[in-house]
Image (cartoon, rainbow, N blue to C red):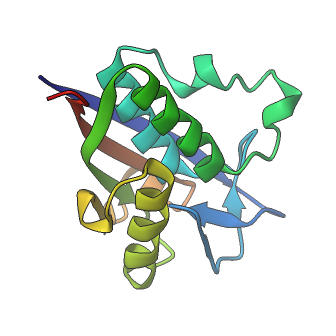
Amino acid sequence: MLRIGHGFDVHAFAGGRDLVLGGVHVPCARGLAGHSDADVAAHAVMDAVLGALRAGDIGALFPDTDPAYEGADSLGLMREVAALARERGWRVADVDCTIAAQAPKLAPYREEMRANMAAALGVPADSVGVKATTTEHLGFVGREEGIAAWAVALLERADA
């Protein structure tokens, strides 16, 4: 048995924060605003996995009203999501994530993002896809007001 989930996340830029994407600290004058480390790529992937599990979303699992998650490392949260999948009898077969950012350029960090998220999910790096794109200066991403990410996850029954 297979299940597919879809995830989406967006965060606005904010000064005085590190930019973290796929667990990589990307050199940038601004980071993203958020209760945790605001890693939009990791958040989209986690929501995709949770969607395939029919387990809600990261806001329900890790509420931003809980001080325990303030400044949280999203890869640590991703490990918890992967553990939940295993507890429920599923394994992550494949994930794919698209990050939309006008700047900075993300291609140099793609492989490290893949490796980081694969390790957090407990899967080989070739089971994680990461792509980066711009929006050709259109919308909030194009105006460099924030970054968005979309992800899909394919889960399979662990006993299959």
Q: Is residue 52 above or below residue 122?
A: above
Q: In x, y percent, where is residue 89?
A: 34, 23
Numbered disc total: 0
Q: In x, y percent, where is residue 95?
A: 28, 48
Q: Of residues 92 and 96, which is closer to you in this image?
A: 92
Instruction: Identify the residue at image location x=41%, y=43%.
Output: 45
Say whether residue 128 is left or right of residue 43.
Answer: left
**Quadrant location, the N terminus:** top left
Say whether residue 143 is left or right of residue 62.
Answer: left
Q: Of residues 147 and 66, which is closer to you in this image?
A: 66
Q: In x, y percent, where is residue 40?
A: 52, 49
Instruction: Identify the residue at image location x=50%, y=53%.
Output: 120
**Quadrant location, the C terminus:** top left
Q: Quadrant of residue 80?
A: top right
Q: Quadrant of residue 129?
A: bottom left
Q: Of residues 95 and 12, which is closer to you in this image?
A: 95
Q: Is residue 125 visible?
A: yes
Q: Is residue 116 above or below residue 85?
A: below
Q: In x, y percent, where is residue 37?
A: 70, 51
Q: Is residue 69 above or below residue 73?
A: above
Instruction: Identify the residue at image location x=65%, y=65%.
Output: 19
Q: Is residue 102 visible?
A: no
Instruction: Identify the residue at image location x=61%, y=21%.
Output: 61
Q: Is residue 9 above or below residue 26?
A: above
In the displayed image of the protein, which residue is found farthest to the bottom? 108
In the displayed image of the protein, which residue is found farthest to the front? 159
